[in-house]
Image (tube, grey):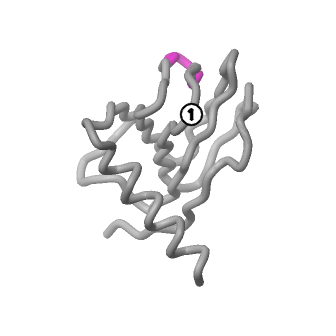
């Protein structure tokens, strides 16, 4: 069963976030800028609308020449059978970003 553990967003644009990892699945929704996510053996370009799902204990770093902002969710699972890094591009209207924004607002209201 998927359980939401954390949802948050970057308050200001970053040009880099150092190599790190999490104990949960991280779903990152890029909402501003473009750049690259670097994993041990793979580099993934991102832009507004890119969604990157990172498995637990998978080290990664993010870089951007112009700066980036993201909204991120930590969950206990992703979807049945999910393994490895998953990359998606949001559809027109950005429904996942809208849903994540509503969840973020709800979490802040307590």
**Position of residue 56 in the picture relative to residue 100 (left or right):** right
Furthest-bottom residue in this view:
110
Label 1 secondary element: strand
Where is residue 9 drawn, in percent x and y?
A: 62, 52
Residues 45 and 12: in front is 12
Residue receiving disc 1: 32
Magenta segment, which residues? 37-43
Examine the rendered structure and indicate whether residue 2 appears above or below residue 67: below
Q: Quadrant of residue 68?
A: top right
When the figure is inspected, residue 48 is found, relative to residue 40, above or below; the finding is: below
Instruction: Find residue 39 and report its image quarter.
Output: top right
12 relative to 40, above or below: below
Q: Residue at x 55, y 49 (%)?
A: 71
95 lies left or right of 26: left
Residue drawn at 25 percent across, 47 percent down: 81
Instruction: Tell which of 7 and 59 is nearer to you.
Output: 7
* Closest to the observer, 54 or 9: 9
Kindly identify the residue that appears in the image at 48 percent across and 51 percent down.
25
Judge left or right: residue 8 versus residue 47. Answer: right
Queried whether the magenta region covers residue 4, the answer comes back as no
- Residue 90: x, y in percent? 31, 37
In percent of the image, x 52 and y 39: which residue is there? 31
Within-10-Å neighbours for mark 1: few <14, some 14–19, many 20+: some
For the N terminus, the image quarter is bottom left
């Amino acid at each position: 069963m998927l359980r939401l553990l954390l949802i948050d967003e970057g308050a200001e644009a970053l040009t880099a976030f150092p190599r790190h990892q999490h104990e949960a699945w991280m779903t990152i929704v890029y909402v501003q800028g473009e750049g690259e996510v670097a994993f041990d053996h793979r580099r993934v370009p991102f832009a507004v609308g890119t969604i990157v799902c990172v498995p637990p204990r998978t080290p990664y770093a993010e870089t951007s020449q112009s700066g980036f902002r993201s909204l991120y969710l930590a969950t206990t699972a992703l979807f049945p059978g999910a393994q490895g890094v998953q990359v998606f591009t949001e559809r027109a209207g950005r429904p996942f970003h809208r849903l994540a924004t509503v969840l973020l607002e709800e979490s802040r209201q307590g």
